[in-house]
Image (tube, rainbow, N blue to C red):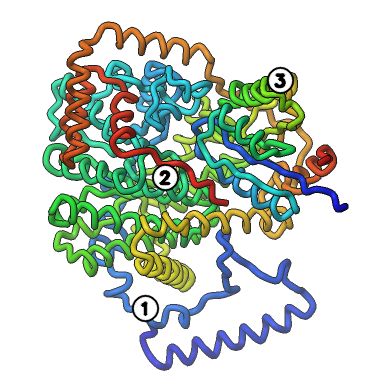
Amino acid sequence: MPERKIRVMVAKPGLDGHDRGARILARCFRDAGFEVVYTGCHQTPEQIAAAAIQEDVDLIGLSCLSGAHRVLFPKVVELLREKDAADITVIGGGIIPEQDFSMLYDAGIKAIFTPGASLDSIVEWIKTNIKPD
Amino acid sequence: MYFSKEMQDASLKLTRKWEDEVQKTLKNNPDQKTRFSTVSDKEIKRLYTPEDIKDIKFAEDISVPGEFPYLRGNQVTGYRGRYWTFRMFSGMGSAQDTNQRWKMLLREGQTGLSTAFDFPTLMGYDSDSPKALGEVGKCGVAIDTLEDFLVLIEGIPLDQVTTSMTINPPATVLWAMYCAAADIKGVPLSQIGGTIQNDMLKEFIAQKTFMCPPGPSIKLISDTVEFGTKFVPNWNTISISGYHIREAGATAIQELAFTIRDGIEYVEDVIRRKKMNVDDFAPRLSFFFNSHIDFFEEICKLRAARRIWAKIMRDRFHAQNPRSMWLRFHTQTAGCSLAAQQPYNNVIRTTVEGLAAVLGGTQSLHTNSLDEVFCLPSEHAAEIALRTQQVLAEETGVANTIDPLAGSYFIEKLTNEIEEGAWDYINKIDAMGGMIAAIEKGFPQMEIAESAYKFQAQLEKGEKIMVGVNKYLSNQPYPIPLVEIDEKVGEEQIKRLQNVRRKRDNKAVKKSLDDIRNACKKGDNVMPHCIEAVKNLATLQEICDVYRDVYGEYKDPGLY
């Protein structure tokens, strides 16, 4: 039986509309052979967690460029845990200062990609770390 | 542009000789790459000659400043009478924080104000809304009520300084606050000047700050145009914006075409809905463009923009007033051209982009700060950015003569090509039934997504270069101080808001909100009711909730 495709959700929590990176990644993931769900802008952490569970994704890629990542990223992880969906891996990207990395890792974000990260490096990280069952 | 047959023959002969030499040279010294193109991937030739502009007629296509087609600018004296407005986009934390930054910028020689609001304000939510979680004061200033607004403009002479407000879905509300503040300060509405961005079409296309669907969004915009024409004659009621379209990944031609086509949509709506004459309001329409890193392409885009708009106003809308044909615009250097790596290089990028904007004849300019890739600008970074403009204006001599690049074979050819490219898009969107129909089909959104993806792929393959990003990398740290907005700003803002809610006359608030609701339902102009409501201390969200309730909410279709 062929291996199931990796299912990825690209999500934009919060109010910022800077979706250039998120949309490029959604395309790139599709071209890399993943199944992709893109939420569009202005999603609350609740909407993202619920959609991820409903869509049965393996990974959520959060994108935030407004500075609200410190509140919104941990909230998504927390909600997934509450809903028994801690097996969904959460990674993040956007404008995220280095001094915030450790608090985000502590909150359960598994990887952070900031400006300059190549598309290939993100795809590689996912292929290495996500093994669909 | 040839003056004689002999001149053409001589030119062609020389050009052929040069072409032969090129072929010989290439055998041993090949070019660095097989294809040379702009940042928008528009192919550029090795050399431009008189042949490239042979069909140009000076009087019709180029002309002089202040004359149709206004290619060379609207002002007959250029920058000699007055430089462009040094207008730095600025807003952070609380109204008081922002007021202090504004005063610093004015002290240092800035000549106009420009307001950056935080995301909750931009989206029409109060600071204590659950949607505002983590966002208050982060990307700009938080404004909930007229009280905040009065703090924001404290000590600013409203009859002397013009203020631009980057505000879109809640533009009616923030403008109402400005009008109410002027009233409280005793400044007549006829004496205040400024701009509200108020361009919803580019929000659906690119920036994604939306609230209600396109139809009612446009209705609110036409309300502001009507109100401004009658009562606030020095206000620019729409700043038709290409900036965000470009930042989302569009090419120069796409930026120009979609912006101009948005402008057509607004003009048509005001004429149809408000039964106004085009010359009554068109002189107060303004534009806002991006100045990206590809120097000549940007200069040509800005020149082409003026010529296209003049033609549209004359031929499509039959404007009679020359001022209706003027494309007046603000420019901002390209945020998306900056890099987080080796951030001091951003000063150089911004300088080149600012120079392009000036050579393209901008009336107003924001130059990005070197740290804007990370956060809101620090005071020091904002000052360097302002000084960049002052050096361009006062030291380089580029403002001495008007449109100095006119007549260049390359510049005129590229200006023509960009204009032609824009017309193709404008005609295509006309054929789709206009910009709203095109947006509903996802057309401009997908064109931009395509361009953004293509550029990213070129960057990853090294076909396009960004210094410090994919070439000339450095492991050296480049530490710069970053501005951080304390979470306390949000807590204090919420306290202030709740305090206002406690002390105000809630009956008066309810009545004025009902008046807005009725105006929405009947199709009346909402502006007078908004001014009344903000004076009664209705909050931003309370008014926007009325809009959401009556008109419905627009959700991002999530195209990619």
Q: Is residue B546 above or below residue B261?
A: above
Label 1 marks a residue whose chain is B
Mark nearest the camera among 1 and 3 is 3
Marks 2 and 1, Cα distance to the nearest angstrom? 37 Å
The C terminus of chain A lies in quadrant: top right
Q: Is residue A126 above or below residue B380?
A: below
Question: Given the image, on which type of amino acid does mark 3 rest?
Answer: Ala
Mark before the other along the chain sequence, 2 or 1: 1
Q: Please tell me how crowded label 3 is: few (under 14), some (14-19), or many (20+) other residues with Cα within 10 Å.
A: some
Q: Is residue A90 above or below residue B316?
A: above
- State the residue lying farthest toward the front: A1
Labels 1, 3: one chain:
no
What's the residue at 67%, 80% (across, down)?
A: B22
Q: Please tell me how crowded label 1 is: few (under 14), some (14-19), or many (20+) other residues with Cα within 10 Å.
A: some
Label 2 marks a residue whose chain is B
Question: Given the image, on which type of amino acid does mark 2 rest?
Answer: Glu
For label 2, the SS is helix
Question: Given the image, on which type of amino acid does mark 1 rest?
Answer: Ile
The label number, if any, that marks residue B448 in the structure image: none
For label 3, the SS is loop
Q: Which residue is mark 2?
A: B203
Label 3 marks a residue whose chain is A
Q: Which residue is mark 1?
A: B56
Q: Is residue B408 visible?
A: no
Q: Position of residue B426 (x, y in %)?
A: 38, 65
